[in-house]
Amino acid sequence: MSQILTIRTPDDWHLHLRDGAMLRAVLPETTRHFARAIIMPNLVPPVITGADARAYQGRIMDALPENSNFTPLMTLYLTEDTDADDLAAAHKSGLIHAVKLYPAGATTNSASGVADFDKVRGVLDRMAEIGCPLLVHGEVTDADIDIFDREAVFIDRVLDPIRRTTPDLRVVMEHITTSQGVDYVRGAGKNLAATITTHHLIINRNHILVGGIKPHYYCLPVAKRESHRLALRAAATSGDARFFLGTDSAPHTDAGKLSACGCAGCFTATNTMSILAQVFEDEQALNTLEGFTSLNGPAFYGLPVNETTLTLTKGTAIDYGEKIITEEGEVTLFDPGFSLHWHVTP
Ligand code: DOR
Ligand code: ZN
């Protein structure tokens, strides 16, 4: 019996597109299934000013496949020197939709991030005033904090104090990986939401480390123990509008991943919708898939939902291939560890 599900075209509320040859190679993987995406600003050098964002938006538009209606939703990278007036102007003009906070040193290309949170207090106040969301990479970077505890400690030491001091600031906890993250969002009001990636619904830390190290499952925040994965699946499929999809699809070449000091990131743009349909089917929650991928995000960002639709049809096993080829090298696609049967028709 074939199962068919038609939903509003999804958006990706957290995406790494990179630049240059990598941008040109990975962009079609997203535009095939998604209408819009929040574009991460962690380029080298980062997207810090309105002018940087305008230029990067132009490069993305130039790289779009022919006849694509995809809209990149630009963001700025918060630094201790961010100019609040420039930020406010970029937000007012509709150029940027959010500002990303990377604690300095937390992840790929985060060296220009924030070390002293008091230095960005004025900018956060201004963002609260103008309604510009803050997207947080929610991990502390203190050397004495265990990597598996960094999200929970960030909530207590950084995020909760910021939200108490600036209650009107709208915040998205990006790529949450813990039950503490889920519970913190559930216990908060309308100004807090969270994105959840595809891969964190599939893997726990055993997948990375048992039976040989699996660099393609290494990302940040790192996947946690199984109870946390189950909490994320429950949140994503619950229908609670404060949780929505942000794939964090983050391409690195195999040379960058398969090294003595491998890069963090899972590349999921290509097969995310097939994987998610299977996850939601397994959780007997196909009825909440559209909310997670297509409705909850626009509601939080105050944007209209997409008018177009996407159809998912269950059928024979799909072969998405193992890698995509780029001028910079091969990029390995995330392997969910089970075969995919949900075909995606835009
Ligand atoms: O795994 C990750 N990869 N986490 C991030 O926060 C950054 C991303 C990247 O840019 O590669
Ligand atoms: Zn990311």
Image (cartoon, rainbow, N blue to C red):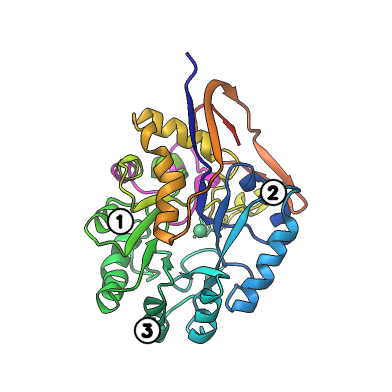
Q: Earlier in the sequence, mark 1 or mark 3?
A: 3
Q: Position of residue 53 (x, y in %)?
A: 62, 72
Q: Name the residue under label 3.
A: 121
Question: Is the residue at mark 3 in contact range of ligand 1, meaning its CB lies under 8 Å from it?
Answer: no
Q: Which of marks 2 and 1 is nearer the N terminus?
A: 2
In the image, 287: left or right of 167? right
Amino acid of disc 2: Ser
Q: Where is residue 123 in the image (x, y as percent from the top left)?
A: 42, 83
Q: Residues within 10 Å of mark 3 (few under 14, many from 20)?
A: some
The residue sitting at 51% across, 74% down in the picture is 91
Which region of the structure is painted magenta?
208-231
Q: Mark 1 points at which residue?
A: 181
In the image, 259: left or right of 220? right
Residues at marks 1 and 3, CA–CA distance in whole angstroms: 23 Å
Q: Residues within 10 Å of mark 2 (few under 14, many from 20)?
A: few
Q: Name the residue under label 2.
A: 68
The residue closer to the viewer here, 315 or 305, is 305
Badge nearest the viewer, 3 or 2: 2
